Amino acid sequence: MNLEAKVGAFVLAGLVLMGTAIFLLGDYTFEKRYTIYAQFHDVANLTKNSPVKLSGVEIGQVKDIILVDSHAKVICAIRQGVDIYKDAEFEIGSTGIIGSKYLQINQGHPESGVIAPESTIIGTDPVSIEKALTKALASVQDLLQQLNSEGPRGSLVGNLKDTVANVRELTANLNDLIEETKPALTKSLDRTDDITQKLDALLAKANTMMAAMATDKGTVGALLHDEKMKQDVQQTVASVKEAAGTVNDMLGRLNQFKIYWNYDWRYESAIKASHADLGLKISPREGRYYYVGGSNLGNVSDINKHGTDYAVKNTVDALIGFERGPFDLGLGLIRSGGGARVTVTPFYKDPFGKRFSVMAQGYNFGRNRVIEGRVFDKPEYDVGVLAKITTWLGIGVRAEDIAETKRGQAWANIQFEDKDIAYLFGLATYGAAGTKGRSKSK
């Protein structure tokens, strides 16, 4: 082969390799495709060459995005042979909270017909996380402004202020009760300490006497050879030990309770309505609590002019809870239906990270009812994210009944400890232990 032939072969091979690279990098394809246009108000950072997915399966590609009359028009190249029905939903999907975007198509029903090529479909605009958080913070700010203002009687602010006033009055009454009983209680505790010291001395003497029982010397030893006398002495010592255990049990129960008031306020912007939950969290010991309260509190006769509110008013919450590390599990009644609630604080050991938690709950698993003319036959599932601003105030967002209505809500939580009620529970336990002898159960 002469030099010219070698140079020609080399140049030809180079051209083939360059053409192959351009073909691969340019994302060219030989498969047949047809074009569909999807129109959005906001494409939420969707880019050219992003994938198009039908029910999670990639079926094409975004060829271009243009601006038409202040609307974003997405030009989609769909693989030939893939039918998309006319009632299909077009929306912007994401691989994660900060992941890449793609065009998601939720398939419709065959009876609605197939979308023809070159058709224009109105897509569902995505919900911006930034806008949702901005609205949530604005709602919380509005709530705080309402709390600082004088609301009319019967309104949310008025009812909340009346509730706070009632709680303050109850707390004042409890303080008066505690002040009245404190001298007697202090005297009783002093007498209890004196009794404990005497019991300790008596137990020391009892131990000495028991040592003497083991021998047959002396008057006591001789008496103890009498089996009846021996049984009586042993029963007396056992009674003394049980009495000392009861006293220690009563003293320990005075400070074992922790009581928290919990108030949840949720605002649903779609219908411009809010819901409120109020309850009491009772923790008798670390890692265990009981929660009782009411959900969706309000007047059942109220009419919402901005949309249909499917939330059932004035329901009951009653849970038994377990706390282990980052997990909080509650089982029982949620809005008058059996279910469970899980709250996870992933960074609970970090001083800043422990402010953030994720909540999920499921309940009403046998639901089959008609509300406002609509049939509900699926369980209720709620999820939410909460950030603690202070030790008593948290804000976040949540989605409720995601299996049916998918209601997005702004969320504010107020929780504070009530030591007066906790002390009252301790007094009640003290009385119960004094009359029933709780140490017997140990």
Image: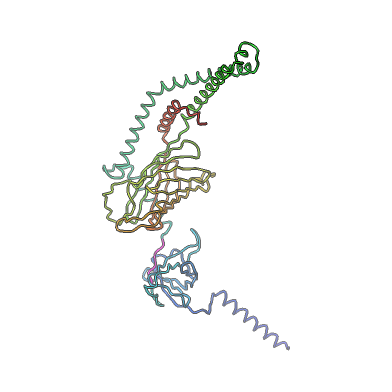
User: How far across and how far down the image is residue 169, in percent?
Assistant: 33, 32
Comparing 343 with 440, the one in front is 440
Comparing 149 with 193, the one in front is 193
Q: Quadrant of the N terminus?
A: bottom right
The segment highlighted magenta reads 121-126
User: How far across and how far down the image is residue 327, in percent?
Assistant: 51, 46
User: How far across and how far down the image is residue 125, in percent?
Assistant: 39, 64
In the depicted structure, whether residue 407 falls above or below residue 333? below
Residue, far front: 227
In the depicted structure, whether residue 35 falls above or below residue 160? below
Residue, far top: 219
Residue pictured at 46% horizontal, 36% vertical: 284
Q: How is the image coloured?
A: rainbow
Residue 331 in view of the camera: yes
Is 54 covered by the magenta stretch?
no
Is 124 covered by the magenta stretch?
yes
Q: Is residue 236 left or right of residue 172?
A: right
User: How far across and how far down the image is residue 92, in percent?
Assistant: 44, 65
Main SS, magenta residues: loop
Using the rendered view, name the quadrant where residue 115 is placed.
Answer: bottom left
Residue 133 in view of the camera: no
Q: Is residue 75 left or right of residue 219?
A: left
